[in-house]
Image (cartoon, rainbow, N blue to C red):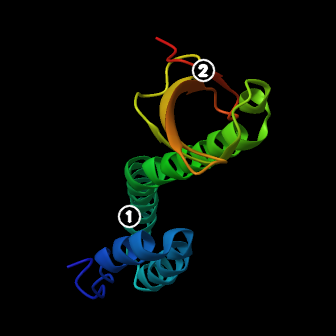
Amino acid sequence: MRHASRAQAPAVWPVAAFTLLFGILGAVSAKRRADQARRTRNSTAPYWIAFVISVAAGAFCWFVVSAVLVGPVVTEIRENQRLEAVQRNVVGDGQLRDARINVTAAQCRPVAERDAEGMRDYLCRLTLEDGHTGTLTLTADEDGKWRSGPGR
């Protein structure tokens, strides 16, 4: 009978839901519910425990999302930039001009994965100044510096 007049404590689940949705702002919900529980002589601990667990769970979920979704997207963007650098360098760095080959455009595609040293093999279709086309197999680093022939 000692606790018979005690009001029921507010629900804990809204703290967890609000924290999962809005992150650290879930502390506002936890504080409001903990204050309400304190006024009715109930424990404030469940609200703060729910907040901490929800922050940890939310952080883990965002980590997984970034590792699974964002990481590959960033890698793809960087590889596209590297491909453009290779194509730009094939046309403009003068290596082919030194060999008396005048190239106006290069369309390259990777034919192998990047190795441990950062090198990758490409197959390039070259458009020559006289309108003919040719192919070139090359190996390039991450900066677009290339050399003729496959690296393997």
Q: With respect to residue 147, does 133 lie above or below?
A: below
Mark seen at residue 68 = none
Q: With respect to residue 139, does 61 lie above or below?
A: below
Q: Nearer the viewer, mark 2 or mark 1?
A: 2
Q: With respect to residue 46, does 122 lie above or below?
A: above
Q: With respect to residue 13, does 130 lie above or below?
A: above
Describe residue 19's horizontal placement relative to residue 98 as left or right.
left
Residue of label 2: 148
Write the residue at 74% across / 29% down.
100
Disc 2 packing (10 Å; few <14; some 14–19; many ≥20): some
Write the residue at 26% across / 78% down.
3
| Residue 35 location (% of width, % of height) | 51, 81
| Residue 38 location (% of width, % of height) | 47, 79
For the residues labelled 2 and 1, the Cα–Cα distance comes to: 60 Å
Query: 112 or 8: which is nearer to us?
Result: 112
Task: Report the amino acid beneath label 1.
Answer: Ala
Between discs 2 and 1, the one toward the N terminus: 1
Query: 121 or 8: which is nearer to us?
Result: 121
Describe residue 112's horizontal placement relative to residue 116 as left or right.
left
| Residue 42 location (% of width, % of height) | 37, 75
Residue of label 1: 50
Query: 41 or 134: which is nearer to us?
Result: 134
